[in-house]
């Protein structure tokens, strides 16, 4: 698609993911055994033959930028077009931190102009989905649209979490409400926008001059264009799409991959998902191991029992240990005779023998009830969990903590351990 440029918004923190995004941007969070969240948007671009892609970073971009490199893993290391990492900058006369989604694109107008595109596709880098953008473009062209918004039908009680769209009988948008208290429609915006570039350029310049604007697509740019009666249409998507912006949705979406026929097909040879990951040897399963309904990535060594869990690359499960309904990230080592249930464990964690995680009575997290819930315990990266400790349900442990050096012997359900020994 030489006439189209894709811009991926990848600068968000994702505060509802708690300790998982304390050290990295949400699009860089590991997902699905070997991927990072942004891999799905990038792979959709590659599979849709979109080869000019700008990735807009802001919050703690180091891990994300390292992961992306020059885009080789997504076939985006090209002489014409390619992958471009676009960070906020300051100059003598212009440039500043991105103030909103629209402002991020507006700050990169010169970058887009270099390619003289007819269309600009604005994407989010923090959703997990499989989508052929060509079908959306065909819809856009067939409707002679100036703006097309991808949307998905959700239950009405969930619609207040999204921008909602009201259409007429030919899918033309008649009203748009950003996160309404009382939704009037089940059509939820996916945060995927296809614009005619000449119109979007004008709209961004106008929005930048509006001092009362939040410089956001959903709050400002889309309503403003709608009020001016531009041709705006809703493209209803019926494929796989998940917002993994909460601990529960992240945990649940990962565990969905363990189903015999998961809705997200990672095995389709005609629509592959690409990533940049370390080369590791095959997974090893000892004679005494038992693995049921789980996703186990290469480099893992299993001596214990794993049930309905996702294990990333290089994970080791010790003899006599049990891991249930959990997500265990890259290079984490779980020692012998441990018990782990309903947990998300970050990268390079060391869990020493006889430790119990996610064990005990159900209790609400008093400090962060809307983050650490559903009994899911979250452990940050490079944490050391000492021998014989009992960590309860709905707990969180911050990145880089050594609980052994801190002399922590137990963590009650609903409690948190904060701090960073590197600071």
Image: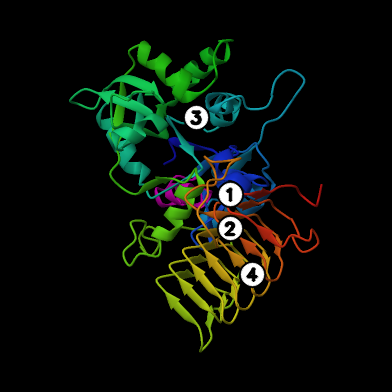
Mark in the foreground, 3 or 1: 1
Q: Which of the pair 4/203 is nearer the observer?
A: 203
Q: Which residue appears at 54% of the width and 59% of the height?
A: 343
Q: Which residues are magenta?
A: 38-51
In 3D space, how far apart are the residues under numbered discs 2 and 3 (Cα atoms)? 56 Å
Along the polypeptide, which appears first: circle 4 or circle 1? Answer: 4
- Evaluate if marks 2 and 3 touch, with contact meaning CB atoms under 8 Å apart: no
* Majority secondary structure in the magenta region: helix
- Evaluate if marks 2 and 1 touch, with contact meaning CB atoms under 8 Å apart: yes
x then y, percent, for residue 147: 36, 25
Mark in the foreground, 2 or 3: 2
Q: Which of the pair 134/213 is nearer the observer?
A: 213
Along the polypeptide, which appears first: circle 4 or circle 3? Answer: 3
Which residue carries the number 1 mark?
414
Along the polypeptide, which appears first: circle 3 or circle 1? Answer: 3
Which residue carries the number 2 mark?
392
x then y, percent, for residue 300: 57, 75
State the image quarter where residue 12 is shown. top right
Horizontal placement of 6 versus 26: left or right? left
Which residue carries the number 4 mark?
355
Number of other residues with Cα within 10 Å of mark 1, as a class: few under 14, some 14 to 19, many 20 or more: many
Does dot 3 land on a helix, a strand or a loop?
A: loop
Q: Looking at this rendering, what residue extends furthest in the left direction?
A: 169
């Amino acid at each position: 698609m030489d006439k189209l440029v894709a811009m991926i918004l990848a600068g968000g923190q994702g505060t509802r993911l708690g300790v998982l995004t304390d050290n990295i941007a949400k699009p860089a969070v590991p997902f699905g055994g070997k991927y990072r969240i942004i891999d799905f948007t990038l792979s959709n671009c590659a599979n849709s033959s979109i080869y000019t892609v700008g990735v807009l970073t802001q919050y703690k971009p180091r891990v994300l930028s390292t992961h992306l490199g020059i885009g080789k893993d997504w076939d985006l290391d090209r002489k014409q077009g390619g992958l471009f990492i676009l960070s906020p900058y300051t100059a003598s006369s212009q440039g500043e931190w991105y103030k909103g989604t629209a402002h991020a694109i507006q700050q990169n107008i010169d970058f887009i102009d270099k390619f003289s595109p007819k269309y600009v596709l604005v994407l989010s880098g923090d959703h997990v989905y499989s989508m052929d953008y060509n079908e959306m473009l065909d819809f856009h062209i067939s409707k002679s649209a100036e703006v097309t918004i991808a949307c998905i039908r959700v239950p009405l009680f969930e619609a207040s979490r999204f921008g909602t769209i009201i259409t007429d009988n030919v899918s033309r948008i008649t009203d748009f409400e950003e996160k309404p208290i009382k939704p009037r429609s089940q059509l939820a915006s996916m945060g995927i926008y296809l614009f005619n570039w000449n119109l979007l350029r004008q709209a961004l310049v106008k929005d930048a001059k509006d001092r009362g604007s939040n410089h956001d697509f959903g709050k400002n740019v889309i309503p403003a264009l709608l009020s001016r009666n531009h041709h705006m249409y809703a493209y209803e998507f019926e494929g796989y799409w998940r917002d993994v912006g909460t601990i529960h949705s992240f945990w649940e979406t990962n565990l969905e991959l363990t189903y015999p026929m998961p809705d997200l097909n990672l095995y389709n040879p005609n629509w592959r998902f690409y990533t940049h990951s370390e080369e590791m040897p095959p997974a090893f399963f000892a004679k005494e191991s038992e693995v049921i309904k789980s996703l186990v990535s290469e480099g893992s060594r299993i001596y214990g029992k794993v049930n309905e869990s996702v294990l990333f690359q290089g994970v080791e499960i010790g003899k006599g240990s049990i891991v249930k309904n959990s997500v265990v990230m890259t290079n984490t080592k779980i020692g012998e005779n441990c018990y782990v249930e309903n947990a998300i464990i970050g990268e390079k964690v060391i869990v020493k023998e006889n430790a119990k995680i996610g064990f005990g009575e159900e209790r609400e997290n008093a400090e962060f009830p809307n983050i650490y819930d559903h009994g899911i315990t979250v452990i940050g990266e490079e944490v050391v969990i000492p021998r014989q400790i009992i960590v309860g349900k709905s707990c969180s442990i911050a990145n880089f903590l050594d609980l052994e050096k801190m002399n922590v012997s137990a963590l009650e359900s609903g409690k948190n351990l904060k701090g960073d020994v590197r600071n």
